[in-house]
Image: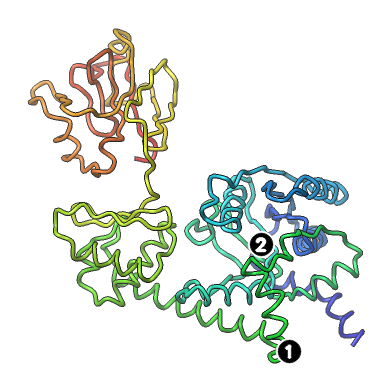
Amino acid sequence: MASSRKSRLVNLPERVAAQIAPLLPAHSTILVGLSGGVDSVVLLHLLDKLSARFSWQISALHVHHGISPNADKWSDFCSDLCASLHISLHIERVDITPLRELGIEAAARKLRHAAFARQPCDFVAVAHHADDQAETLLLQLLRGAGVRGASAMPLSLPKQPQMSGLSDSIALVRPLLHCSRREILEYASAHQLHWIEDESNADDNYPRNFLRHRVLPLLGERFPAYRDTLTRSARHFAEATMLLDELARQDGAGKIDGETIAAETLRSLDPARAKNLLRYFLHGIGAPMPQLVQLDDMLNQLCNARQDAAVCVNYSGWQVRRYQGRVYALPAMEDFDRNLMLTWHGEAELEWPALHTRLLFQHDHRPGISSAKLQLAPVTLRLRQGGETLRSHPNAATRTLKNLLQEQHVTPWHRDRMPLLYCGEKLVCVPGVAIASEYLAGGHESAIAVVLQGH
């Protein structure tokens, strides 16, 4: 027995290397998510040992959530650990208060992913292991998840933000996914590693802790190999997800355009395939998966509401809308100050809170606004009040702003949030829509283009 245990410990680095070396090219920069718990400490230790062999550059990130009264001690521990290993550590403090409606665990996870995405690296390594995999699968099934949710966690996730929640230049890898919690603890003990214990891990009020401390030990008495069998089931679900995605790609071929999909396509399919396509579309743009009741209601409104109805279905902080036969999904839009007015003093960028985006002022772009004419009066940015008009060409008729916005297919929920550029009391420009003809730069005149970032 002792010989078997020793063999597992000796082989653990080699098993991890065999799993992840094909995924991580030489000279890759790998950022380790370091909480200070035993899992992440072992992961850091293992990758540090392997880094010289594979020419990996290892760094670490500790996210200070501020939830526990011991949070400062944890960050100090991580600092000391990384200093002892000569590994660069970045500590990022986050505030979960604005996201508390998601639940503490979900809010903390969202903020961690956002922190990972801001770091300059090729890969993010996290310390999920086989026991986490089993717990995740059971939790998903108990929540009534579909096959995508039940496929649990893969060894790695490619550079796709809709899958990993990270940026489009960072991939996620889980080097310990084939290791059990017991193996990790034995490795830590054998190498005399130190770690911290999060007091919340003992709180059975959290569903994951309830499974970990009460359900899984009992399950292990009757089904000792449950980790392997549940992992195998997760792989089956993952394969089923791939097949359903392929069906959705066929059903949606030519009908999905960027972040919209044709409502008629959903209407033409039988309910099961329509729901599969809608799930595929939502997943592809990074939207959360709706519950079954929400999905049924969403599909019913998108397909059956009268043609001129303003369809808007709210769920999980997102909105699904329909406009001119297209289905849109976007984060729910917050209220905004309808008296918003900003003065432009020549900045290259300005925040535009009504759309949670920025305005870029680009010099010497054509067509553009005459820089000289903008000097004639104060330049302000305002919101639509109603009744605005603009003539976009010297020989054209004066048009209402409402007509121009409709003509440019600006969606109704964006129209009242669009920035309008004024010089004095004269409407000069609606970014991305039109420039007043009398303010157009001519010839070699210096010009400024106003661009709404992301639109």
Q: Which mark sits nearer the N-terminus, 2 or 1? A: 2
Q: Quadrant of residue 34?
A: bottom right
Q: Position of residue 243 (x, y in %)?
A: 41, 78
Quadrant the C terminus occupies: top left
Amino acid tagged 1? Glu
Label 2 sits on a secondary structure element that is loop
What residue appears at the point 87 percent right and 59 percent down from the top-left corner?
194
The image position of residue 92, as x and y in percent, is 68, 43
Residue 281 location, quadrant: bottom left
Which of pointers 2 and 1 indicates the residue nearer the eye? 1
Disc 2 designates what residue? 24
Which residue, as the protein is rendered here, is positioned at the far top?
376
Q: Amino acid at mark 2?
A: Leu
Q: Residues within 10 Å of mark 1 (few under 14, many from 20)?
A: few
Q: Residue at x 66, y 66 (%)?
A: 174
Eyeballing the image, is 431 above or below 423? below
Q: Is residue 161 left or right of residue 68?
A: left
Q: How far apart are the two marked residues, 2 and 1, measured between alpha carbons?
A: 37 Å
| Label 1 secondary element | helix
Q: Is residue 216 left or right of 318 when viewed as pictured?
A: right
**Vertical placement of residue 276 versus 453, above or below:** below
Residue neighbourhood size for the residue with mark 2, other residues' Cα within 10 Å, grouped as few (<14), some (14–19), many (≥20): some
| Res. 383 mark | none
Disc 1: which residue = 221
C-beta proximity under 8 Å, tags 2 and 1: no
